Image (cartoon, helix red, strand yellow):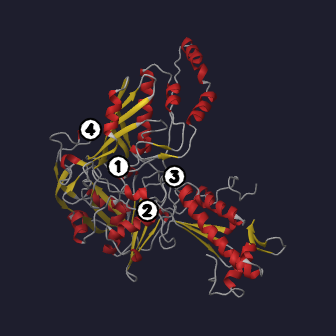
Amino acid sequence: MSASSIGAPVRRTEDRRFITGRGQYTDDIRRPYQTHAYFLRSPHAHATIKGVDAKKASKMPGVLAIYTGEDIAKDKVGDLICGWMVLSKDGSQMKAGRHPALAQGKVRYVGDSVAVVIAETPDQAKDAASAIKVDYGVLPAVADAAKARDPGAPQIHENAPRNTIYEWALGDAAAVDAAFKRARHVTKLDFINNRLIPNAIEPRAAIGEYDQGTESFTLWTTSQNPHVARLVMSAFIGIAPEHKFRVIAPDVGGGFGSKIFIYPEETVCIWASKKVGRPVRWTAERNESFQADAHGRDHVTHAELAVDERGKILALKVKTTANIGAYMSTFSSAVPTFLYAPLLSGQYEIPAIYCEVDGVYTNTAPVDAYRGAGRPEACFVIERVVEVAAREIRMDPAEFRKRNFIKSFPYQTPVASLYDAGDYPGALDKALQLHDYRNFGKRKAESERNGKLRGIGLSSYIEACGVAPSSLAGMLGCGVGLWESAEIAVTPTGMVEVLTGCHSHGQGHETTFAQLVSAKLGIPMEHINVVHGDTDKVQFGMGTYGSRSGPVGMSAIVKAVDKVIAKGKKVAAHVLEAAEGDIEFKDGKFQVAGTDKSAEFGAIALQAYIAHKFPTAEIEPGLK
């Protein structure tokens, strides 16, 4: 197997610059005459802003400007948006409260941005921020999702009564109720899936720069999807038209979902760069990241599982209250709904499922996608309730699972997901064999005799990822198409440039994508350059999240390479003076079938640009 073959071990091409400290992250970029931003954040979870006194701070050394929510409102900078519409059970739209990039009139969580200081150095900006006096009118706050809708709970957004964003449901409630009536046993459990804080090695950062000559903006940012960032900040926030707005996401040191979203800080940096007439840069301190990066999870759930006398599952009923935080983030509405409920069947054949999800506001940092986003929450619910049910009916947990595993495919779950294939009993049998599950009781007894405790746990997990172009995405309210783009450009010398809408934040795309193209074209990986993360170079793309780069991004690359090969065959037919149907392509060579007439890939690439031997009305010059 050659080094370029799919599956062959190769050295990661990007690692040389990473391990030698030559990576180019947002904080490594230096722009001429750059300034530094520091955000003054609320120490209160909920308060009105009665006034901001920045007179003393504005006169401190190095301070160029101090801006508040009033300033950004005067310039008609739009609010941050949530890009996934969710409808309640009654058909009403979700209640999305305003989310200004700088707080206006009220702060809603500890860390909410009240003002930004622009200064010559980071320390000068930070010192000046400490001199700003904010007159807060402290209000009662609620942080617990389970209490957000209690009578008397503080109202966080006026347009969301009882702090309720939506009351959503999926499944057949009547079928579930009927199944529960004939159940021999019902297991009931309450869960708290605790809030998580992302903590990538590279904190979020942004540099905004305005070019007065071209009246255009450039934003360098730690983003998993720079094209979506440009789209949202152009079309919805209103920074500038797309053709006047470039977003560059250079090397990104870890994302895990937390760098998908459009945040206040990058919005403020790009807006402020025009105000001060100089580049504005910001890099989060670690405590800022803990406060202001979108958090994950935070569910309060009650689940019930109905089982018959044979140990077969009849139905599942789930009620979840999902903490969305103080504001809706870019995709926050979808995480506890469409990314959660369709996975509640797990690997089990459950005839009826009904799930209700209430999204609520609290005085906490916004919550959005993080490390699996909805699917781990669903797995936690189904696996805990299955495990407890097995123990309550005194059936071996492994046997209970195997008895209820899906065995016939394709299988349509009651919660939208369609499974095409799987061997869940076989996978579990293999795991039990590897761990000698049959003899676990002996090992446990022996441990007890030696004064030690031994336990064993089982967990099954099915994942929904690699979401691809689908009418279902639109039906479910997604504001983007979830397709991916790829462009293959071959130079006259046979070098290949791969432009992809995916973005890498540690996955090794530059190696993996090059290896794929190398295998398809039969050329060395060293002849292939992978380009991503720049909206002025790549036509458009949806970015990287949900394990989509392989199944969606690489599929786009394969289709683009196939088009290059197809055009190469047309060029080769003229060069080799043969019928196009007689041209074969294999191992980097175009050959006339049944003859020794052939030409290397690079030679045909050159001929495609010379274009002497074929009619340009039939074939456009170039190989792209």
Badge nearest the viewer, 2 or 4:
2
The reply to whether dot 2 and dot 4 touch (C-beta < 8 Å) is no
Q: Name the residue beneath numbered marker 2.
A: 481
Q: CA distance from mark 1 to mark 2?
A: 23 Å
Does residue 286 lie above or below 191 as drawn?
below
- For label 1, the SS is loop
Q: Name the residue beneath numbered marker 4.
A: 146
Q: Mark 3 is on which residue type?
A: Ser
Is residue 22 in view?
no
Dot label at residue 439: none
Q: Mark 2 is on which residue type?
A: Gly
Q: CA distance from mark 1 to mark 3?
A: 20 Å
Dot label at residue 367: 1
Q: CA distance from mark 2 to mark 4?
A: 34 Å
Q: Name the residue beneath numbered marker 3.
A: 547
Does residue 563 lie above or below 101 as drawn?
below
**Residue beneath the point at 60% across and 30% down:** 429
Q: CA distance from mark 4 to mark 3?
A: 32 Å
Q: Is residue 322 left or right of residue 255?
A: left
Query: Upstream in the sequence, badge 3 or badge 2?
Result: 2
Question: Horizontal and vertical percent for residue 221?
Answer: 44, 63
Assess disc 2: are there few (<14), some (14-19) or many (≥20) residues with their C-alpha within 10 Å of its C-alpha: some
Q: Mark 4 is on which residue type?
A: Ala
Question: Horizontal and vertical percent for residue 573?
Answer: 73, 79
Q: Quadrant of residue 562?
A: bottom right
